[in-house]
Each structure stands twice: as C-alpha cells, then as structure tokens.
Image (tube, rainbow, N blue to C red):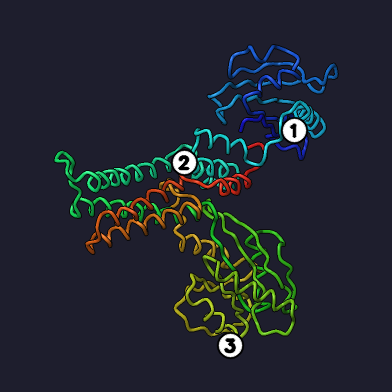
Amino acid sequence: MDDTICAIATSIASPGAISIIRVSGALAIDKVNTIFKGKDLTKVDSHTIHYGHIQDNEKIIDEVLVTIMRAPKTYTTENTVEINCHGGYATTKSVFALLLSIGIREADAGEFTKRAYLNGRIDLIKSEAIMDLIDAETEHERSLAIEGVRGYISELIEKLRDKIVTLIANIEVNIDYPEYDDVEIITEEKLLPILKEVNKELYTIIKESETGKIIKNGINIALVGRPNVGKSSILNKLLNEEKAIVTDIRGTTRDIVEGTITIKGIKINLTDTAGIRETEDLIEKIGIQKSKEKIKSSDLIILVLNNNEEFTEEDQELLNLIKDKKKVIFINKNDLETKLKLDTNETIINGNTEDNDGLNELIDKIAEIFDLNEFENKNSIYLANIRQINLAKEAKKQIENAISELESGIPLDLVILDIKEAWELLGKIIGKVYEEEFLDQLFSKFCLGK
C-alpha cells in the first residue's frame, strides 16, 4: 500500500454535471499538484476545496474543483484528493489518463475500502456494509446496511469476544500459575453459567440474523405446476410486465424466467419454472431439471393448478415433491368451469389473470407467511450475510462443545481449545483474523472507485 492509486468514483456511462476522480496515497497531494494550475495544493489546509485547471503542460484539460483531505482524517486514512471535473466520457477519461501518466496507479475494485480496512479505520463488517449500502434496493436494505456502517453490529461481536477472552485469560492463569493464592480459581460452577450466557447470546444473534438475510437477499418464490396452467401469466401480472412468453402451447416455458417485486419493503424474487411433466424433448427435460433445483432453493412454492381440469397424477407428484416446503396453492382460471376437486389442508387461493382475481390475496398471503408487516418494528442490528452467519454458527458450536466437555469432566486445558476457537471465529466476522486470499476475493466484488 505504499503507492498512490486513483479511480473514477462516479458513473460516466451517461453525461452528468460532474465526475469525481478519487486519488489516495502518501503522494496523492504532491502528484495532483504537478498537473493543477491554481493554488499550491501542498500548502493548503486539509478538507478545503480549490478552483483551478487540470493541465497537461500548457494544454488545459478541464476546469475543476479539487478537494484536499490530509491523513489520517480520510476514508483510507491516507492523503486523499478528489477532483471534481465536468461530467461525460471524454473529459473524465482525459483527466484520468493524465493521472496515470504521472505515475499514479489505477485502483483495483474495492481498493479504497480495502485500504481503509487494512489501515484500521473500519472493520470487515463495516466494509461489507458499505457495499451493501451502495447496492441497497429497498428502504429495509438501506437501514440494515447503515447499521453495519455505524458499527452497532461490530460492537455486538466485540462485546462477546471481550467476554470470551476474559474467560480464556482467567483459565490460562489457573493452568499456568496454580500456586498463586491471589488468583481467582475458575471452576466448572463459575465457567458454565458464563459459557451458557454466551451461547444464548449467539443463538439470539443467529436467529435474528435470519431476518437480516431476508432483508438483504429477499425471499425466493417459485411458481410451479404442469405446463399451461398459467404460471407465466401469473408472473407477468405480479411483475406488471410481459416478462414470460405466454401461449396455449404446452411446454412454452423451457427455462426459468425471473423477476423481482417489493412487498412491504422486502424484495420478492419470483421465478417462473418450466412446466413439470414427463417429456422426451431434451431441451424441455433440462428446463424441468432446473425447475426441480429451483424448488429446493426457494423459500416458498406457489403451486399453480388449473380450475377447469381434473386433478392429475402429475399434480399429485408435484404436491409430493414440495411436501416439506412452505407453499400456497393457487387455483387459476376460476372464471372457467370448475372441474378440479382437491382435498387438502394446504392454503388455497382461487383466482385468474383475466381480471386479476386472487392476486392481491396472494400478495397478502406472502406477507402473512413471512411476517412482513412486522419488519417495520424490528431492530435491524443483524449479521447481514451468509459468511457472517455461518461463522457465528461455527462459534456457537465450539461454545456448545466446551459446555458439553465441562459437564463431562474434561480438564480445563482441553476445554479452553474450543473456547479459543470460538473467539477466533468471531474475530473472523469483524476481520480481526483474516487470510489475504479471502480479502482479495471479498474486495474484488466492490465497485471501482470504492
């Protein structure tokens, strides 16, 4: 991190009033000063803005405003310069090319945030939350991300680690210096309640974080049924667009078709699957296999049946296939003659796509199943992604192992190994423990300029 980096921090895909080019590194101010005509940037105060021109020798490239921010009070904790130039492709690229020509390196994706993390300004949870904030599509996602940026989630994990490390220190003193009379003796009776308290706190964090996962990733719902029962029409109506091709020909949908709606501020990822039936058509077979895979990964299945057709063996096979999944049965085409007879305790909604009958009821049922009305009132301090949740689950498992070992009379010098492992796993959540390869993979997912 000894070099100076730069990146275009705003989109140049379409013309805008301004573009911002960000420069960070020990020599950021000195290097930009060599192409800036105006005040001497090396002598101005930190966090000030200066008018002037970016020039290549005597050639004026653009009229700009330059913001100077001196270390350590910057995003990366390094000297930082932001050049506000006129928007548009040609001007921005010309200024950027000039920066590269004077020895400033183009930043990798996420490198500014990576430097902020490695320089100790933010932890890993805050780093991930920053990207989540940029990607947020709903108000709930934004709220969840901002709590991560503000550090509340990190504080939660740090408090748990502090509690665990205090236990570790006391146990090690007991093991290494048993002859000291002034050292508190750690016994099973004293250790167990604390470990059980930590385990309970981890359980609460993990359980509540399932809500955070829904906020961030949305709810995955698959429309499933035999060919030509109206799945694609339902998808199109819910999305309010002609996303899926609709015809009377059986097997028209041969691949999954996806779209997203929002219910109560939560993303609903809808998938129209290929009609599941016996077929010799190779392409349709592939689509049906994808449909079955989608069923496994979905949070809710909407099984679509045809009101004016009798219940078939294929319908029963589909019911068997989704028997262990959350499901709603939507009986479509209720504007036609009723031929379907269905004996089930499952939730049933009748409707059709001609006059949108039953679709609002379907949306309300989805909100009810996932308790979406309560999201407004829930505390949004959660672990926000699978990586964090899985590490918390692993830490909880180690604490449970330690509790079981203590109750079985295992010596403290063995029990402490599981407690230390739990402490390190929680450290991985906030980045106190990390591997370089992991960091490279994580920050490569960030946008350029951040």
Locate residue 373, reporting x and y percent. Answer: 45, 54
The residue most toward the left is 181
N-terminal of the two: label 1 or label 3? Answer: 1
Q: Secondary structure at mark 1?
A: loop
Which residue type does callout 1 highlight? Gly
Q: Position of residue 105 (x, y in %)?
A: 71, 33
Q: Is residue 246 left or right of residue 450?
A: right
Q: Nearer the viewer, residue 341 or 110?
A: 110
Q: Up-down: is 163 above or below 33? A: below
User: According to the image, label 3 marks what residue?
Assistant: 313
- Circles 2 and 3, Cβ within 8 Å, touching? The answer is no
- Separation of residues labelled 2 and 3 (CA atoms): 50 Å
Residue 125, how many percent across, how many down? 49, 43
Foreground of the two, 305 or 416: 416
Category of crowding for the residue at label 1, using alpha-carbon neighbours closer than 10 angstroms: few (below 14), some (14–19), many (at least 20) = few
Q: What's the residue type where badge 2 is placed?
A: Glu
Q: Amino acid at mark 3?
A: Glu
Q: CA distance from mark 2 to mark 1?
A: 31 Å
User: In this orientation, which residue lies closer to the viewer: 394 or 9?
Assistant: 394
Residue under pointer 1: 16
Which of marks 3 and 2 precedes in the sequence? 2
Q: CA distance from mark 1 to mark 3?
A: 59 Å
Say whether residue 78 is left or right of residue 170.
right
- The quadrant of the picture occupied by the N terminus is top right
Residue 285 figure quarter = bottom right
Q: Label 2: few (<14), some or many (≥20) within 10 Å?
A: some
Q: Which disc number belongs to residue 147?
A: 2
- Is 304 situated left or right of 409 in this image? right
Q: Residue at x 36, y 57 (%)?
A: 398
